Each structure stands twice: as C-alpha cells, then as structure tokens.
Image: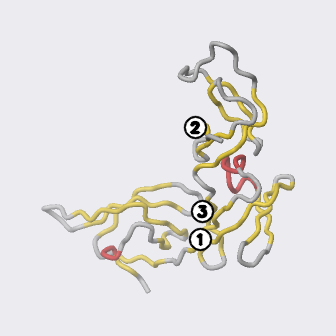
Amino acid sequence: MAVDTSDFKNGMAFNMDGDVYQILEFQHVKPGKGGAFVRTRLKKLKTGSVIEKTFRSGEKVDPVFVEKVEYQFLYRQGNEIILMDLDSYEQIPIGENVLGDAAKFLKEEMKIMAITAGEEVLGWEIPAFVELEITQTDPGFKGDTVSGSSTKPATLESGAIVQVPYHLKEGDVIKVDTRSGEYLERIKK
C-alpha cells in the first residue's frame, strides 16, 4: 500500500533505498513555473543521520509501521549492556557501541526505548536529560564563584566524566544533556 507525498506527516516512516527513514519536517512547494514538489528533512533510523531530499508531487513511498518498545537498563557486563523488555521480562544484551556516547549516562533502572519495525530493532533512544550524582570531583576553593566561567572535571555515578562549575561538590545531583554530554544545572535536594 504505497502512499504519495500529499499524505506526508511529521514522524511518518517509510522505506527508501533499502533503509527506513522518518520524516522530521516537510514543506510542499508550488513554484510559479514547473511542477510542485515536496522538500523534506529525513532521519535514517538505523544511524540517526539526517538528510534532505526533494520529492516530486505525487511520488509514492512504501510506509513502515514503526513502534517504540520500552526496555529497562539492568547492568553492564563487559562491553555489553543488559536490557529487560518490560512486557515479556526477557533480558537481551546489546553492545555498548550501539548506543554510542549516550551509553556512559545509563544508570540502573533507567528506561530506554527501542525503535522497531516488525521484529527488527532500528535504533535506541535514551532520555535526552538525566539526573546523576557526582561521585568524585576536586573540592572548590574560596574565590571560585558560581558565575565564573571556569569548570572542573567531575565523575558521575554512571562513570561518565563531565565538566562542572567549581562550586559543585561530591554528592550533588546534576542534570546532564545526554546528546551533548554537557552539564545543565544542579538539582535541589
């Protein structure tokens, strides 16, 4: 059941060139001269890469039903991450490299979403923001200010190392952006 460009919606997924792509945004363009077309930004679900593609108006694509399945992070075992399907309680191992840099922000019992099409897992999503406790950092000294632009390294409970302001200490809980690895704010206790 092919769908044409007039049925495009943000979030819709379809097969193209042997891969599954998801529409991030699209725009119908009707120039004064020539045929109408649809300009799109597409995300390749397996790799996360974003491309721009133009379709002729009326061009057809094969839609794919994409589903998100919730998993829970249990523990690390060597270079593998052990996840549990929250519906079937089945435990599955995946390579840490599959999640990329985001894997270093995982903490026990954290929810992770698998993006699936049929039985095939196309990708994984971890929360964009996590709250983690600082387990090791150098102490701040008198004169280190909150508004200063200086930072120091801090090791978090997940093992990740991020740059934090000097006034933070061990035991503080901070919010981190998992996409960039940046410190955002200290969480009040």
Q: Nearer the viewer, residue 163 or 49?
A: 163
Task: Name the residue type under label 2.
Answer: Glu
Whether pointer 2 and pointer 3 mark residues with C-beta atoms closer than 8 Å, the reply is no
Residue 53: x percent and y percent?
39, 60
Q: Which residue is mark 1?
A: 68
Residue 22: x percent and y percent?
48, 66
Q: How far apart are the alpha carbons under marks 1 and 2?
A: 29 Å
**Earlier-in-chain disc, 1 versus 2:** 1
Secondary structure at badge 2 equals strand
Q: Which mark is residue 45?
A: none
Classify 105 as above or below 14: above
Task: Name the residue type under label 1.
Answer: Lys
Q: How far apart are the alpha carbons under marks 2 and 3?
A: 31 Å
Task: Report the mark closest to the observer, 1 or 2.
Answer: 2
127 on left or right of 85 = left
Check disc 2: other Cα within 10 Å, few if <14, some if 14-19, many if 20+: some
Q: Nearer the viewer, residue 58 or 102?
A: 102
Number of numbered markers: 3
- For the point 55% across and 20% down, which residue is it? 148
Task: State which quarter of the image contains the C terminus.
Answer: top right
Task: Name the residue type under label 3.
Answer: Lys
Q: Which residue is mark 3?
A: 46
- For the point 77% across and 55% down, which residue is it? 108
Secondary structure at badge 1 equals strand
Q: Which mark is residue 185?
A: 2
Res 111 → quadrant: bottom right
Residue 171: x percent and y percent?
75, 36
